[in-house]
Amino acid sequence: MTSTKLLVGAYRKSATKSFSTSSASLGRHYKLLIVGSGSGGCATASKFSKKLGAGHVGIIEPKDDHYYQPWFTLVGGGIKKVEDSGKKMSEVIPKKADWLKTTAEAFDPKNCTVTTATGEEIKYDFLVMACGLQLNYNLIKGLPEGFDKDPMLCSNYDYEYVQKTWPAIQKFKGGNAIFTMPNTPVKCAGAPQKIMYLAEEAWQKSGVRDKSTVMYNTSLSVLFGVKKYAAGLHKVVDSRDIKINYQRNLIEVNTDKREAIFQKLDSPGETQTYKYDFMHITPPMSTPDPVRKSCLVDEAGYVDVDQGTLQHKKYPNIFAIGDCFNAPTSKTAAAAASQSGYLEKNLTAVMSGKPAYAKYDGYTSCPLITGREKCIMAEFNYDSLPLETFPIDQGKERRSMYHVKKDIIPIIYWNMMLKGYWNGPAAYRKLMHLGTDGPEKLKDSY
Ligand code: UQ1
């Protein structure tokens, strides 16, 4: 896996101005500094560099490439190519923003500075934390090295390991196929099971399904947190004879014996060992180490914001967007898109001396692919109530929703969201429900 540290200080000529912190002049000061150029960071940089003009927005990001991570499910399922999942960072960071190609190592919110890996202190008037989540494969004994030893271990969450998924699915000749979900919040909580449905379907077609047990070993005690979509998923699981083992948290992989050891969260101190012939692993995740160790986070290690305004609870000139904060919604790019609209309003207000006023409702969406050409399009809010865009029942498997996910949303993502022009589908939801009782009415029946 690429270490972010290795990239620190690297300097690449690119379309977007990029600064190595070692070669640029010291003592820089930005009106708005953004930490991270994932989906939330880019959308924010686009919106505010247009408003504030060139030279006033800085964005700290060490990586060379930006990946559209929802694509990885399709790569693992043999539907899309990994090469098409990303673009050069220089192409997605807006031209009017300064790209600081390094990592943020320390935060001093009282003095409004961020110290980078090269020791530069960058000053800001306003800070947006958009640093996402880090993948902690190393917290599972036997990983990450196990991925190099066993071709039947794969993981859609990582650019390298996702490339093992489809070959492993094709190689599987029967036995135990295990799909895991860890004991931490993850980005896209549906992804650990989407790949299971794609794999199971492939095994039905290749004829190995009758010789195999397909298991979803999840740390949670429910299949999905929203009743309506959990009901739809349970129908899928039952009809396809998939076994769900609740409260099982993967702690060790022994590649020599092909054994996976799970902590039994319902019987403290006990473990359970499963033989595996194929395993898809979703790793534990956390905010990046420097953020997790900073004073910006709550006890659980997430940036501590007001769940409505996304403003930091202690430092009013700091906001957060995307996967890194502690508001209780499901972490997805769709959530970040919706948040970007509220963040724009609130940060603009605070920049002109007014209070933050716009209240994010927790909107998030998870296109739950259940097979090639099938998808349950979950959309919901903080109260786990469905907030559906289309005037159809999205709790059922639908071909139309599969094509929305596979063909339409990537176009929206690259051409609208990253450029600051997509705040989620809320406006379209109202339009789509004109002439019906509307989603508000539908909500009552859930
Ligand atoms: C969405 O807005 C979005 O942001 C770009 C996604 O990102 C990957 C999504 O997956 C989804 C589902 C949405 C919601 C949009 C529609 C049309 C339901």
Image (cartoon, rainbow, N blue to C red):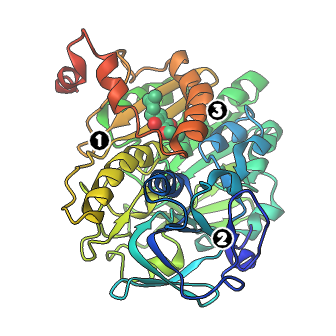
The quarter holding residue 374 reads top right
CB contact under 8 Å: marks 3 and 2: no
Residue wearing tag 3: 198
Q: In this view, does 52 lie above or below 145?
A: above
Mark with earlier residue (3, 2): 2
Tag 1 secondary structure: loop
Is 275 or 421 nearer to us in this picture? 421
CB contact under 8 Å: marks 3 and 1: no
The quarter holding residue 185 reads bottom left
- Tell me the amino acid under the disc marked 2: Pro
Name the outermost residue toward the top: 435
Q: Quadrant of the C terminus?
A: top left
Does residue 341 appear left or right of residue 407 in this picture? left
| Marker disc for residue 381 | 1
Tag 2 secondary structure: loop
Depth-wise, is mark 1 or mark 2 nearer the camera? 2
Mark with earlier residue (3, 1): 3
Q: Where is residue 238 in the image (x, y as percent from the top left)?
A: 47, 27
- What's the CA distance linking mark 3 and mark 1? 27 Å
Residue 437 visible (yes or no): yes
- What's the CA distance linking mark 1 and mark 2? 32 Å
- Tell me the amino acid under the disc marked 3: Leu
Mark with earlier residue (1, 2): 2
Q: In which quarter of the image is the N terminus?
A: bottom right
- Tell me the amino acid under the disc marked 1: Asn
Confirm or reject: label 1 Cβ below 8 Å from ligand 1: no
Residue wearing tag 2: 62
Depth-wise, is mark 3 or mark 1 nearer the camera? 1
